[in-house]
Image: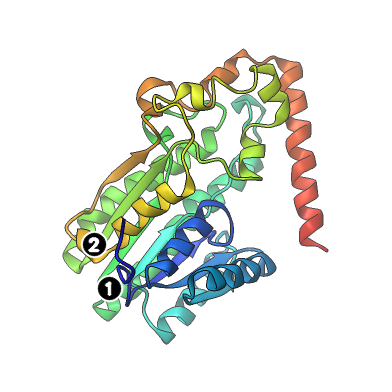
Amino acid sequence: MFRDDLLAGHKILVTGGGTGLGRSMSEQFMRLGAEVVIWGRRGSVLDEAAAEMREATGGACTTMAVDIRNAGAIDEAMEAIFTQQPLTGLVNNAAGNFISRTEDLSANAFNAIASIVAHGTFNTTVAAGKRWIEGGHKGSILSIVTTWIWTGGPFTVPSAMSKAGIAAMTQSLAVEWGPKGIRANAIAPGPFPTKGAWDRLMPEPAMAKLGGGSSLGAGSIPLRRMGEHRELANLAAFLMSDGCDYLTGAVIPIDGGQYLSSGGNFHALTNLDDGDWGMIRATIQASNAADRAKRTT
């Protein structure tokens, strides 16, 4: 679809760039000639991903272990990047989410999501934006939101609220920073299954209760299939390229038409009962404990 040097001369930071959709976008940027910087909390995961992407693409990738819940760490890492060479693009991809009845959520549970998605995205964006403005550089911001910004997100309220805020930030900065040569756009994906994140959003107990998840999966999508990572990576590459530098303030869905035909990805979970939610909580807690164990070994 693209010429090999489409992103030559670009330097793009991808938060959460070592796994999932972040990694898919990073690898596509590298394949198209960009130098990529990836952030994440686990340095070993980043280093392994970077090595594999370099081998696959022949491109350049730098890793930085940064927890975007920490505003000071964000600013310090961004300063190190710009001291070496200013970014041309930023992809706000890092996120966190889990399903839960809203009445079961604590303040800490809400903050666990909002600190990454809302606060982390804002602080990362401002850290890059103020340096672009101070240096007189152009820049492109691409944020990954969800279609829940239009439909609401039942059983994922902290994420839906945070992602809606990012969409508002995108449109606000498109106007505020447009005169300074900075573009801001967002992609709103539908289902693009990734190991780990998908298991938390649709644990096995819920899948079984809902008949294999057909009401939450391909059956709810007009195109009758899930998204493929390369499709989102292609859209991200287009939005970061020089060829669309008149495009700003857009929030683009890529979901096979799902949000137009449903009331949010997880509306079918209203069919679950107290026992089902107990099983789901236990499954998510076990998955989180396994992740913590991996990080300490």
What residue is pinned by disc 2?
177
Report the number of discs.
2
Q: Provide residue 71's location: percent of width, then percent of height.
A: 52, 65
The answer to whether 42 appears left or right of 61 in the picture is: right
Name the residue at 38% across, 21% down: 261
Residue at the bottom extreme, as displayed: 84
**Structural crowding at the residue carrying mark 2, measured as other residues with C-alpha within 10 Å and reported as few (<14), some (14–19) or many (≥20):** some
Depicted 58 relative to depicted 39: above or below: below
- Image height check: is 9 above or below 93? below
State the mark number for residue 133: 1
Find numbered disc 2 in the image and state the secondary structure of the residue it sits on: loop
Residue 82 lies in quadrant:
bottom left
Q: Name the side, left or right, on which 182 lies relative to 290.
A: left
What x and y, as percent, mark residue 276?
Answer: 73, 20
Examine the rendering and report whether any part of residue 148 can be seen: yes
Number of the label disc, if any, that sits on residue 282: none
Tell me if mark 1 has few (under 14), some (14-19) or many (20+) residues whose alpha carbon lies within 10 angstroms of its own: some
Residue 16 falls in which quadrant of the image?
bottom right
C-beta proximity under 8 Å, tags 2 and 1: yes
Q: What is the spatial separation of the Cα atoms under label 2 and label 1, in whole angstroms?
A: 9 Å
SS type, badge 1: helix
Look at the picture and state if 171 lies above or below 257.
Answer: below
Q: Amino acid at mark 1?
A: Ile
Residue at 34% across / 75% down in the picture?
Answer: 131
What is the x, y in percent for residue 152?
A: 43, 28
Q: Where the C terminus falls, by quadrant?
A: bottom right
Q: Position of residue 166 (x, y in %)?
A: 39, 47
Residue 127 visible in the picture: no
